[in-house]
Structure formats: structure tokens, C-alpha cells
Image: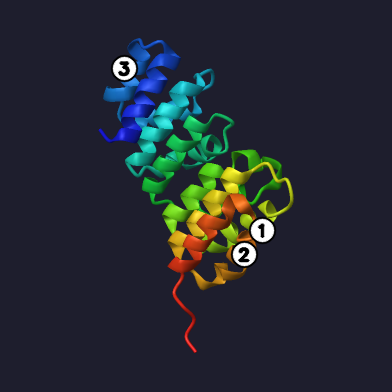
Amino acid sequence: MDEESRSLTERLRRESGGGALFERLAADAGPEALAAVLTEPGRPLWARELAAYRLGVAGDRRAFEALVLLLNHRDPPRCASAAHALSLLGDPRTARAAAALATNELRVAYALHPVRLLTALAAPESVPALITTLRRRLTPHDPYRRVALACVEGLGALGDPRARPVLGDALAHPALAEAAARALRRIPARRR
């Protein structure tokens, strides 16, 4: 069991109070039983999260919708677990969904994990979404510096020359300047 799976299991064990249902979902339930949890009425959030996570890391695309909803949840640990599962799921819709969440100004407070997921996916949607999200964060007194910093770091990791202008603008922001300079150094020099 990897660290993300261990952390999720312990968090949900505490949230659920343990018990037979938790133990079955955490260890014994097969894909059909897990998929049923996602659609059965009355299931608690922890059960849906555990089922979606287990299906997602196993590559079962029936988890996609539930994981996207969890990626946009107000609880950061749920977002982190969903991002991890989505990164392993292999669903071609993942990058579009993460880009939509990262660029949604009404949900920007919850954009950190979609931004990190876009970086991990390195999909065609990643760089344009990170540029858009970062450009919006470069306004005076923007309260979402962690999202902006994740965008800067992501653009540096992706190394796409299209990011040069927005990273150059980020240099003027003291909270982002050092990370923006590092990111710019990671982008290959232009050929003449």
C-alpha cells in the first residue's frame, strides 16, 4: 500500500468509526460491489470516497464522476486523494475536467489539487489551463497565493515556452518571484 492509500484508509477509518462496512470496502469488496456503492442511495460520503478511490487506482473508469466531484470538494484531503486516484485512472476525460475545475473562478478556493493534477498529467490541456489560472491570480491582493504558486511550479515542471510571458509577469509578485525565476530557468531557451 502506497502512502496516499495508507493516509486515505486511516482518515476514512476514523471518519467512519471502523466497523464491518469499512473493513469490507477497504479490503474485500470487489469492483462490482465498489461500483454499487457509488450509485446506491443513502451511502455515506466516506464509503463513496473509499469505493471511488479503490476503483480509480485500479483503473476502473466507473469511478471517474465520483472522483471529479471529490477533486472539487471543500476538504483538501479528499481533493488530494481524488487527484491521486485520477492520475492513475487513465481516463481521457481527466485533463479536461481538471482544467475546467482549475479555471473556474467561482471555485478557485478549491483549485489547488486540480492545478497539481494538471501538472502531473502533462496533458495538452495542462499548460493553457495553468496559464489562465495563474494570470487571474496576478491581481493585487489576490488571496489564492497557494494556487498561484502551484501554477508557477507546474509551468516550470512542464517547461512549455508558452508560459514565458505569464511567468515573467509573476516575477513582479514578491510571493511568486523566486519560484517564477526557477520556472523560467527550466524552460528551454528560444532558438534564434
The residue to which callout 2 is attached is: 166
Q: Would residue 8 be found to the left or right of residue 162 on screen? A: left
Along the line of sight, the residue nearer the viewer: 44 or 95: 95
Q: Tag 3 or tag 2, which sits nearer the N-term?
A: 3
Spatial CA span between label 1 and label 2: 6 Å
Q: Nearer the viewer, mark 2 or mark 3?
A: 2
Along the line of sight, the residue nearer the viewer: 146 or 40: 146
Few, some or many residues within 10 Å of mark 2 (<14, 14–19, 20+): some
Q: Would residue 41 be found to the left or right of residue 14 on screen? A: right
Q: Which label belongs to residue 135?
A: 1
Q: Which label belongs to residue 23?
A: 3
Q: Is any atom of residue 125 visible in this view?
A: no
Q: Would residue 49 be found to the left or right of residue 104 on screen? A: left
The quarter of the picture where residue 31 lies is top left
Q: Secondary structure at mark 1?
A: helix
Spatial CA span between label 1 and label 3: 45 Å
Q: Which label belongs to residue 16?
A: none
Marks 1 and 2 in Cβ contact (< 8 Å): yes
* Residue at the limit of the structure toward the right, as seen here: 140
Along the line of sight, the residue nearer the viewer: 133 or 123: 133
Spatial CA span between label 2 and label 3: 48 Å
Residue 61 in percent (x, y) is at 41, 44
Q: Tag 3 or tag 1, which sits nearer the N-term?
A: 3
At label 1, the amino acid type is: Arg
Residue in the image at 47% along x and 31% along y: 77
Marks 1 and 3 in Cβ contact (< 8 Å): no
Q: Secondary structure at mark 3?
A: helix
Q: Is any atom of residue 166 visible in this view?
A: yes
